[in-house]
Amino acid sequence: MPPERCGVNLNAVDQGDKTPLSIAAQKEYEGVVKILLGRNDVKPDIAHKYGQVPLFEAAGEGHQGVVKMLLEHVDVNSNMVEEDGRTPLFIAARKGCDSGSPILAVIGRH
């Protein structure tokens, strides 16, 4: 049975204001990210309490595959700025990705 028929809100947030997509992006659950992004009712740009969206979660953890999937989605803004003024590219660089990192190249192309 589809989640919406069971009363499941796939954009609901947990105690940290993270959606299922944010958690899947952070944990590098590529299969879950793909399923969620394929649904029309999942909003990929819902920010948690610190202003970060799933793209920030994946970039900050260095999850290149998830970052690429998110950036290919029409509703994901690669230039989004969190409340502290940081972008996903900045987050990835600050988390230790060096200038030759594929994740920086993926984010930088968008």
Image: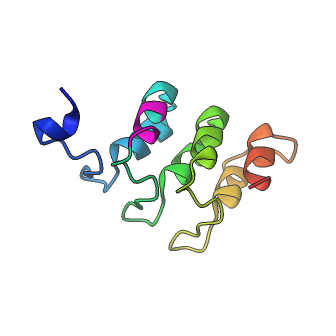
Q: Is residue 63 above or below residue 91?
A: above
Asked if the stretch drawn in magenta spans residue 36, the answer is yes
Most foreground residue, 45 or 51: 45
Q: Is residue 86 shown above or below 101?
A: below
Rendered location of residue 69, percent (x, y): 60, 39
Query: Looking at the picture, how far across and down is residue 81, in whole percent?
Result: 58, 70
Q: Quadrant of residue 110?
A: bottom right
Identify the residue shown where x is 64% and y is 64%. Answer: 87
Q: Position of residue 58 (x, y in %)?
A: 56, 43
Residue 48 drawn above or below residue 32: below
**In the rendered picture of this protein, how many numbered marks are placed on residues?**
0
Q: Tell me, yes or no, if residue 29 can be seen here.
A: yes
Residue 62 visible somewhere in the drawing: no
Q: Main secondary structure of the magenta part?
A: helix
Q: Is residue 62 magenta?
A: no
Q: Residue at x 62, y 36 (%)?
A: 63
Image point (63%, 48%), residue name: 71
Query: Horizontal and vertical percent for residue 27?
Result: 47, 33
Tell me which residue sits at (25%, 51%) in the image.
12
In this orientation, which residue lies closer to the viewer: 69 or 101?
A: 69
In-image side of 88 versus 27 (left or right) = right
Q: Nearer the viewer, residue 67 or 27?
A: 67
Magenta region, residue range? 34-39
Please indicate whether residue 68 sits to the left or right of residue 27 in the image.
Answer: right
Extreme left residue here? 6
